[in-house]
Amino acid sequence: MSSTATAPRTPAGAPIRVVVAKPGLDGHDRGAKVVARALRDAGIEVVYTGLHQTPEQIVETAIQEDADVIGLSVLSGAHLTLFRAVLDLLAARDATDIVVFGGGIIPADDIRDLEAMGVAKIFTPGTTTASIVDWVVSRVGAPA
């Protein structure tokens, strides 16, 4: 992002804040780090939680950091369980205004199930970082 560009903002004028997390036992975080860097390069505030986070830790971080969005990277095959746990915890904490998206190697049928349970978007391998950034900005950013 050049010094003359304006960072994306929420409709309230605050910078967009995203928590990027790796839930569960999956130890492959390259994709999460690439997405986090792309979001940061676009001027979005990013908190990367690191590996092996529990859904409780992720939701607590998102609430403490006043996040607009949680991005989960799941490659372990436990995506249905982990996304459901995060969504349930957000509901229990009255924080359903936090948008949840994710990525990983997720079968098409499971993507439909995740979207039905409230996950806003799933990105699969091959998705460009630019399209992820554009989606985050269009989903939670102020109108241009």
Image (cartoon, helix red, strand yellow):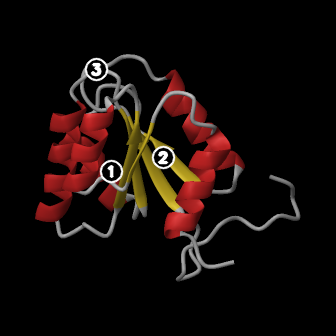
Q: Residue at x 34, y 63 (%)?
A: 98
The answer for how far apart the CA atoms under marks 3 and 2 are is 22 Å
| Above/below status of 50 relative to 140 | above
Three-letter amino acid code of the residue under disc 1: Thr
Residue holding disc 3: 76
Name which residue lies at 25% across and 67% down. 96
What amino acid is found at the position of numbered circle 3 in the picture?
Answer: Ser
Residue 62 in percent (x, y) is at 34, 55
In which image quadrant can residue 82 be found? top left
Q: Residue 139 in the image: x percent, y percent?
A: 50, 65
Element class at badge 1: helix
Q: Quadrant of residue 26?
A: top left
In the depicted structure, whether residue 131 falls above or below residue 6: above
Looking at the rendered image, the disc whose residue lies closer to the viewer, 3 or 2, is 3
The numbered mark at residue 61 is: 1
Which residue has dot 2 on it?
47
Label 1 environment density (alpha carbons within 10 Å; few <14, some 14–19, many ≥20): some
Q: Is residue 74 found left or right of 142 in the rendered image?
A: left
Q: Tell me if 40 is positioned left or right of 81 in this view.
A: right
Which element type, helix, strand or loop, lies under badge 3?
loop
**Which structural element holds mark 2?**
strand
Judged left or right of residue 99, residue 114 is: left
The one of 25 and 101 positioned closer to us in this rendering: 101
Structural distance between the alpha carbons of marks 2 and 1:
9 Å
Q: Earlier in the sequence, mark 3 or mark 2?
A: 2
Mark sitting on residue 44? none
Crowd rating for badge 2 (residues with CA inside 10 Å; few <14, some 14–19, many 20+): some
Q: State which tag comes first along the sequence, 2 or 1.
A: 2
Q: Of tags 1 and 3, which is closer to the observer? A: 3
Whether residue 31 is situated above or below residue 35 in the rendered picture:
above
* Amino acid type, label 2: Val
- Contact (Cβ within 8 Å) of mark 2 with mark 1: yes
